[in-house]
Amino acid sequence: SQQGEEDPQALSIQEGENATMNCSYKTSINNLQWYRQNSGRGLVHLILIRSNEREKHSGRLRVTLDTSKKSSSLLITASRAADTASYFCATYQDYKLSFGAGTTVTVRA
Amino acid sequence: GAGVSQTPSNKVTEKGKYVELRCDPISGHTALYWYRQSLGQGPEFLIYFQGTGAADDSGLPNDRFFAVRPEGSVSTLKIQRTERGDSAVYLCASSYGLAGGSDTQYFGPGTRLTVL
């Protein structure tokens, strides 16, 4: 069964705009990770945030984690056409990743 | 290569046949994972190896599915008596198997299995 749920399911934005997607989960976690998947490159790890962290940055990515609400958000700033992909949050517990169904992001030129 | 590799990239088989899917992890990674991804869904955990042994096989859907990693490196996922519902992309990942919540899993490109 899948623990995470992403919202929205799909997102279409103009190049240069920011994209925000949210993830909710059900049980306690060690960490939460975000992955990107497109047909050309498979599933690529983007960022990991530990359960004792609240915010993390990596380049144009900003991730927040609220363990009291069991939720996380991923912000992509200044989007580019190459950011077009599906984005998945995955909770990590006992060496296993549990993925949501993903958010499909389309960046229009 | 530096990444996780999987062969074949595509496999088409007939219902009832036996298939083997192979995964070559990143050199030095002791942990290896298999996931299955159906269309429109995120990957679902199948089995996790630490070294040669299956540390957690709780995600295998039934006894038609079996995986081995005899020398602690390459792994093979074996599916007997395939069913149409087994059609999916089978993803392999590897990691250092670190404890403490900082372990990152690196995924291969997957094998797309189609059961006719």
Image: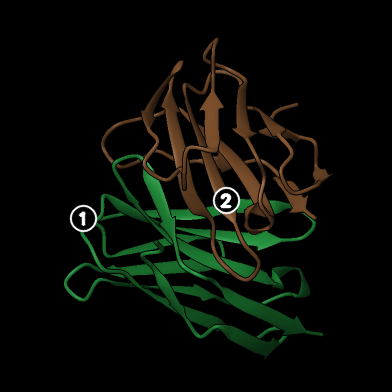
Chain colours: A green, B brown
Q: Residue at x 62, y 45 (%)?
A: B91
CB under 8 Å between discs 2 and 1: no
A100 left or right of B42 in image: left
Chain letter of disc 1 in the image: A
Q: Residues within 10 Å of mark 1 (few under 14, many from 20)?
A: few
From this viewpoint, which residue is outermost toward the top?
Answer: B71
Secondary structure type for disc 2: strand
Q: From the viewer's perspective, is residue B64 above or below residue A13?
A: above
What SS does tag 1 mark?
Answer: loop
Q: Which mark is residue A76?
A: none
Q: Please provide percent x and percent y for residue A36.
A: 61, 61
Q: Is residue A96 left or right of residue B112?
A: left
| Amino acid found under the numbered disc labelled 1 | Asn
| Placement of the C terminus of chain B among the 4 image quadrants | bottom right
Residue A16 x, y percent position in the rendering? 69, 84
Q: Which residue is mark 1?
A: A52
Q: Which residue is found at the position 41% from the left and 63% from the top? A: A2
Residue occupying the point 55% across, 10% down: B71
Which residue is labeled 2 in the image? B36
